[in-house]
Every structure is written in C-alpha cells, then in structure tokens.
Image: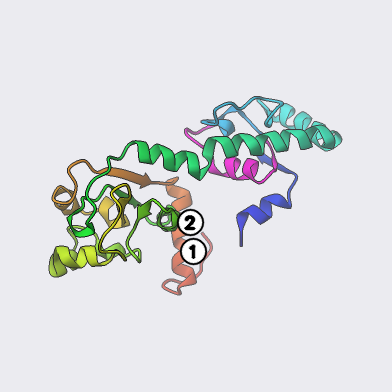
Amino acid sequence: ENISDVYKDEYILIAPIFKGYGLINKVIEAMASGTLVIGDRTAFNGIDGFEDGIHGLIAKNEKEFIEKIEFALSHPTFCKGMRQKARQLIGNNFSWEKNIDMLFKSISWTKIMVNDKEIDFFLIGAQKCATSFLYYILKDHPQIIMPNKKNESGYLGGEIYNTKGREWFYSRYQSKSMHSKLILGDASVDYLYDPKSIEEIKNFSSNPKFIISLRNPIDRFVSGYYWFVRRKFIPNTNI
C-alpha cells in the first residue's frame, strides 16, 4: 500500500503531537501529498518557513482543535490554497535535489579507478529505518555509484569481507573505472553495530561521510515485528 495514495484520499490530517523533537515524518508526508494538517506547534517542528494559516493550522488545546477542524470543513476553498502552499513548501525544503546537492558539497572528488578509489560515504542505520529506500534512491542518481546489490553482510570488517577481501568488495560495483567527479558509496545496517567496521573503514576512506537513518524506537519495533510476521518467522499476535 502506497501511503501517498492514502493521504491523497484524505482532506485533513489531525496531528496532536504535543511532545517530541525533530521532524514529524507523517506531517511532512501529508503536506507533500496535499493534505491539510491541523496540529500543535510540535507537529511542524523543523519545517522552515511554515506559517500558521498559510501552510496549515496550529491548535494549542482540544477546544482549538475542534474550532480549526470546523473552520477547515466550512472553508474548503481557503483550505485548498493552504494545501497547495504546504505542498510547495515541503517540495522546496525536502526535495531530493536539494538534499543530494548538500551531500555533494560535503564530499571531495578523488580517483577515477574504482579499485583505487576511496569510499566517499557510507549509508548506515537500524533495521526498518528506510536504509533500503535510501540505497535505491542514491543508486539511481547519475553522480553516485553504489554496489549492484545492497548486501547487509558484505560490509567492511564483516565475516564475508574478511574471507573474500578487498578485490571482492570492489567487484560489487558494476564499473571498473569511473569519472573523477562521481562519488562512491556503500550501504549496510551492520556498520552501525559492528565496532570492527570502524577500523576497516579507515583503510578505505581518509575522510568518510556517514548518512545515518534512525527512527522512533517504538515505530521501528512495530515495523520490524510485521516484517518478521510477513516472512512467517514469528506468529502474528496482538501487540
């Protein structure tokens, strides 16, 4: 099920967060899909340029939530304009182009032979934290070279690497040579857990960058639970 399709079918997302820090992903997804968000101030954390009444509606308590919901339902034309402005704001702030450009600015260009080139960055994170999604996005970018397949166990310092060695590690990349302005990346969640990987990374990169993808621990636990259920590793019980 595509979450964007769900949001597109809904007119309003109610987000009484009240406690928390950082970006609220569900709010960003809803705004990007053109859904009007009514939330407390915390719901819009980290969204630069957000203005109450222009990109969404802020409510401080239960009474204000009711008032803002009634307003939205009775003023569909006005709220349509807010939804459009909210979508534009999220597009400007969180586009892949903007974030990839930020990544490029932090990475220096190096060699042209893949097996001589340092690894510019490492994509790491916990299980069920969208590292696979990020891997495919980065792999599709014309200026980034990633391994042909995301091999969680093939990380630097791991058992497979220690058995097969450096030549095998570089053989996972499709090309044997590359343009000097392309950048090389690797991806595995196991980099986050294995302390031996840090020492091995030093042999492959003098100035490594890290993209770390994390998630609310409870959300990650629930997602991980259903991942195991879908693969019939554990029974489906009421959690």
Q: Is residue 20 magenta?
A: yes
Q: Which mark is residue 222?
A: 2
Q: Which mark is residue 51?
A: none
- The quadrant in which residue 92 appears is top right
The residue carrying pointer 2 sits among few (fewer than 14), some (14 to 19) or many (20 or more) residues within 10 Å by Cα, namely few
Task: Label 2, secondary structure: give it.
Answer: helix
The residue carrying pointer 1 sits among few (fewer than 14), some (14 to 19) or many (20 or more) residues within 10 Å by Cα, namely some
> Residue at the spot x=71%, y=37% of the render?
84
Which of 189 and 81 lies nearest the eye of the viewer?
Answer: 81
Which of 97 and 113 lies nearest the eye of the viewer?
Answer: 113
Left or right: residue 223 compared with residue 174: right
Magenta span of residues: 19-37
CB of mark 1 within 8 Å of CB of mark 2?
yes
For disc 1, the marked residue is 226
Please identify the quadrant where the N terminus is shown: bottom right
Residue 217 visible in the snapshot: yes
Which amino acid type is shown beneath numbered disc 1? Answer: Tyr
Task: Label 1, secondary structure: give it.
Answer: helix
Q: Whole-percent x and y of residue 93?
A: 54, 35
Color scheme of the displayed model: rainbow
Q: Whole-percent x and y of residue 161?
A: 18, 64
Q: Whole-percent x and y of residue 219?
A: 48, 50
Answer above or below: position of 94 versus 238. Answer: above
* CA distance for labels 1 and 2: 6 Å
Which amino acid type is shown beneath numbered disc 2? Answer: Val
**Residue at the farthest bottom position:** 232
